[in-house]
Amino acid sequence: MIVRLRLILVAVAALFAGAGGVACARSPEPPRYELAEAYFRKGNFASAYLIALPAGHAGDPRAQYLLGLMSQRGLPPVTRDLDEAVRWFGHAAHKGHGDAQYALAQAFARGEGVPVDKARAIAWLERAAQGGHTMSIMSLARLHDEGIDFPRDRTIASGYVKRAAELGDTKAQVMFGERLAAGIGLDPDPEAGDRWILRAAELGEPLALIKLARRPLDKEGAQPSEFVAAHAYATFAEQKAEGELKDQATALKSDLAQRMTPTDLANAADKLKSLTAPKRS
């Protein structure tokens, strides 16, 4: 292990030495996490590891989380080691890294690298949620909604969904809009619910776009202008979605087009431009 670590550090030194001989004349800067992340996103896991390892040992929680992911998934040159993954996640989680806190909660919930401990799993979820980690907030919403590890309380669940929506999670915005419309855990308010769904659609959330695009097909006597807007929503969803959702959007767009005139389709194209135009802050 010591020999391997020395080889890694030598490789890191060689990597940064290539930036120019001038660096030898001054103290070297610590490896940048951003470069490790760039390599990771490109699938160059070996280079990501070489840079993330010393950054993680230096205390960067982002690098520590990245190293945890690599150990959890067994991304070469790292072998899959759940104990090691939990160790790295723990370092980052104690520094307030939301994704690491969520990963640690999942590890305790599933018994991956640690014994199953539901109380600690929930504690880490709540800690991440307090920091604004929307995935953790939505996980707590589901637990309260379904009565898992908590007494079932749809009002508390809706409160969590609302918080995630307010933090900008577009899927939470759709869910909160639906809960408002149906009065799930709060007083029904269909108009307010519709505003949340429209807000998510404007941000390009495929779930919201598809929901809006279906409306004229489910409505008797829908007007041409409604089909125009719906076709634009379906096209936008097709651009933003992947997999099954993308297929749904494509099929929906075709159904709508069969009920539209060439002029309607041209107007839908104009509507799409307004939807996809950069939004001014």
Image: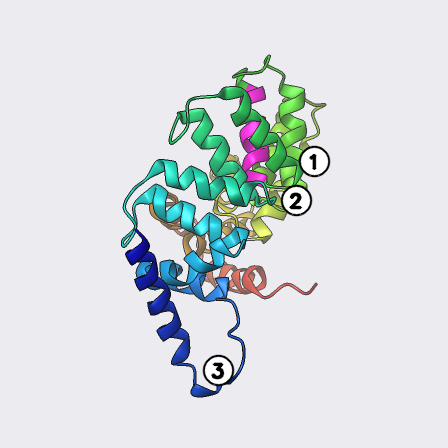
Give yes or no for residue 142 being in the magenta stretch. Answer: yes
Residue 48 x %, y % = 38, 61
- What residue is rendered at 34% in x and 68% in y? 10
Going by the numbered disc 3, the residue's amino acid type is Ala
| Circle 1 crowding by C-alpha within 10 Å: few under 14, some 14–19, many from 20 | few
- What residue is rendered at 70% in x and 63% in y? 281
| Circle 3 crowding by C-alpha within 10 Å: few under 14, some 14–19, many from 20 | few
Q: Earlier in the sequence, mark 3 or mark 1?
A: 3
User: How is the protein colored in the picture?
Assistant: rainbow
Provide the residue designation for mark 2. Answer: 167
Q: Would residue 193 appear left or right of 58 to someone viewing this image? A: right
Q: Earlier in the sequence, mark 1 or mark 2?
A: 2
Provide the residue designation for mark 1. Answer: 191
Q: Secondary structure at mark 2?
A: loop
1 or 2: mark nearer the eye: 2
Which stretch did the figure color magenta? 134-145
Q: Secondary structure at mark 1?
A: helix
3 or 1: mark nearer the eye: 3
